[in-house]
Amino acid sequence: MALNPFFQQGSSSEQRLIQQLINEQLRMYGVEVAYIPRKFVKKETIIREISASKFNDNFMIEAYINTYDGYTGAGDILTKFGMSLKDEVNLVISRERFEDFISPFLESMPDDEITITTRPREGDIIYFPLGKRLFEVKFVEHEKPFYQLGNLYVYELQCELFEYEDEIGGWEGMDTTVEEIDATLKTQGYINDLELFAFTSQAQATVGISSGYIRRIILNNDGYRYTSTPTVAISSAPSGGTNATAVAITSCIGGVCSIDRILLTNAGAGYTTTPTISFIGGGGSGADATCEIITDSYGITNVAITTGGYGYINSPSVTFGSPGFGGNSAYGAAVVSIGNTISRILISDAGSGYGNTSITIASPPSPTGIGTYIFNEVVTGSISGAKASVKSWDKDTSILQIGITSGEFLPGETIVGSASSSRYTLKKYNVSPSSDKYEQNDEIEAEADLIIDFSESNPFGNY
């Protein structure tokens, strides 16, 4: 049977009235939120999965908080990886307001960035100003209330707390132009820093010579069960002389260390008899060493760094000037500091037969530095083969922010951009997986080890 023609199921004027009343209610009782559409940057060609996206637009719109008594969801959960926040919120926005004030802007964007423009989309972000938090739209309910007077008037956005993922890149990936929003994301995300450089300088040093010095230290027994590097103690020189000093270099296997060699930091001066050498601390025992002294000739006793240079990745070769006729050449090893400079020279053999002499420290490797990395391009390490996607590139500070795809980059290799062909030398690799203040797994593990140490063979006893 047909419907009664004398009763309307909703006229256009009635539908407009309801829409206007809803719009007015939202303006009165809602909150102003920022709707941030997700733009697609890169799609996988096989299964069309979005591997990179960005958020750099925002649209203010009024929304009613449907969960007025607080956040829903699982709340704050303590997991083995730290605190996990599972807050949810439901927001109601006007269909007419979205279609009139947001859709036209979305329609003007490239089709490969925005695929749906007529309604809110799952994956877009809502900035909730009351809690100063970002929520991701997980589901859009468009039929609630269910066809009042034959029409639909609102969208209900079911949102979960947004988790910053590696697919979103730095300031280029998240730059909404709203300072309050961008500030909350400045230090977040699974992004690592590559500190690059494009220039180097050679280190310079001077040497001191003397007689009555230790030419070299001979390791007779490397010891065993050292847990840290022991201190090398050398008996004092006679009055008026200079005490010799040395450091032990250890090698470790399975957490158990032994002494590999002993290098002089100062060969001393004025010794007339062979000094004794002993080892203090380190947790081990059994190490034994003797030394050879030279009393009738001059050798290299110390090296003073005048310029540490810049750009050193590995220890460079060190060359001393030639000794006199019948003398023995000196040998040393350079120590590279954290700042990629030379901090000191250790002497393995002080030589003999030297007059005035010089020292040459090899130049650092030739750096590579050209081009500008492009957001989301793949960069590859020339030696390690590690790959990552570019998140941001600051040429002034030479900091390249990346999201690791595979492998681990090695200092000294060239980082090559696949699209830009940019090439810079890696100085330092700063690993910073996340700055989430709720991730406390390291602190939890440290506190747990104070109670039970599972690195012991039997954490519950003394054997």
Image (cartoon, helix red, strand yellow):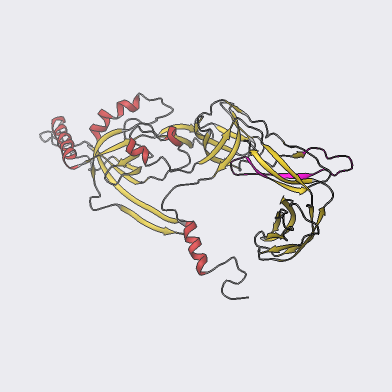
Q: Quadrant of the N terminus?
A: top left
Residue 124 seen in the figure: no
In this view, the residue farthest toward the left is 6
In the image, the segment drawn in magenta is 320-344
- 363 or 366: nearer the viewer: 363
In this view, the residue farthest toward the front is 240
Above or below 127: residue 373 = above
Q: Quadrant of the C terminus?
A: bottom right
- 49 or 422: nearer the viewer: 422
The x, y position of residue 325, in whole percent, is 89, 40
Is residue 312 a member of the stretch shown in magenta? no
The x, y position of residue 196, in whole percent, is 57, 35
Is residue 341 a member of the stretch shown in magenta? yes
Residue 205 seen in the figure: yes
Q: Residue at x 37, y 52 (%)?
A: 86
The rendered magenta stretch, by its main secondary structure, is classed as loop
The x, y position of residue 36, in whole percent, is 34, 35
The x, y position of residue 16, in whole percent, is 16, 32
Left or right relative to 425: residue 125: left
